[in-house]
Image: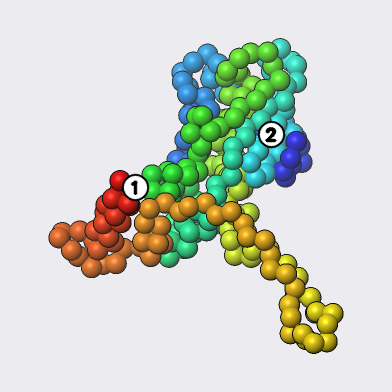
Amino acid sequence: MSGELLNHGEPIVVTTPRDRIGHGPWARLFATAVVGDEGSSVAERGRALARAGAVHTVSGGAGELAARVVGSDDKDYAVAFKASAIPPRVWAAVAVTARRNARLAAAIDGREQSVHLEHLMRFDWTSPLIPNGDDLIRTCTCANAGLCEHLAAFAYVVADLIDGSPSLLLRWRGCYEAEADAVEPERAPITQADSSDAPWQAGALPARRALRPLPLGAVLMCLGPSELRVGGGDLTDVLKRAYGALADSGRA
């Protein structure tokens, strides 16, 4: 188990009065990504376990959410949700744009859930905050294949926690680590040369890190709308289409 232990490891009880657990857009997307058919008997048992405080020892960190769940058979099971972190350069670029937009700044800081930010990440950067089904790894130590009541219960607890603190989702997706990595890259220490003939010689340069290609028009996304109208649209949209045409011709 990795990450920060939540609620001191004590059971986390979902107390929302409605049948549906998870009300904000990120919480809802997460619950449906894991559970799928929320009208199924497995989903109903999961909701019952979440409301009964069956989920305990919950921890959250970059790439993994983990917990233990006491099932309807009174046995204790280990569950986890894992996903690859959002690429640091993508999140850093999105953060530059978002902090200039009042609607997105609170979401970037983990204070609000934003449909707009999820849409931006999913469709413009192909790095959604809520992983697609194939990119979300679900594990449980029970013998059931596929979705079980223990994973459903944990999914609903996570959705409820996201409603209380949206930053949990960003920590799991590695967003805070990504932004820090982009702002403060690792540097090799500068050392004084031993030779008196080269007093200004510095130490070795740091090794180059492999860079992930940015999506088409990434610079335009960072700059945002230009407020210049061309042919009934913003200049940024026109340039983005032009870049796409050039890229297609280059691949031909």
Of mark 2 and mark 1, the one earlier in the sequence is: 2
Tell me if residue 103 comes above or below residue 136 in the rendering: below
Tell me if residue 107 comes above or below residue 157 in the rendering: below
Residue at 58% across, 61% down: 182
Name the front one of labels 2 and 1: 1
Looking at the rendering, which quadrant does residue 243 occupy?
A: bottom left
Tell me if residue 40 comes above or below residue 36 in the rendering: above
Percent position (x, y) of residue 159?
55, 36
Residue under numbered circle 1:
251
How many residues crowd around disc 1 within 10 Å: few (fewer than 14), some, or many (20 or more)?
A: few
Percent position (x, y) of residue 98?
44, 59
Percent position (x, y) of residue 51?
61, 26
Looking at the rendering, which quadrant does residue 102 occupy?
A: bottom left
| Secondary element type, mark 2 | strand
Q: Which amino acid, mark 1?
A: Arg
How many residues crowd around disc 2 within 10 Å: few (fewer than 14), some, or many (20 or more)?
A: many
Question: How far is mark 2 from mark 1, CA to CA?
Answer: 43 Å
Q: Nearer the viewer, residue 129 or 210?
A: 210
Residue under numbered circle 2:
66
Tell me if residue 76 comes above or below residue 102 in the rendering: above
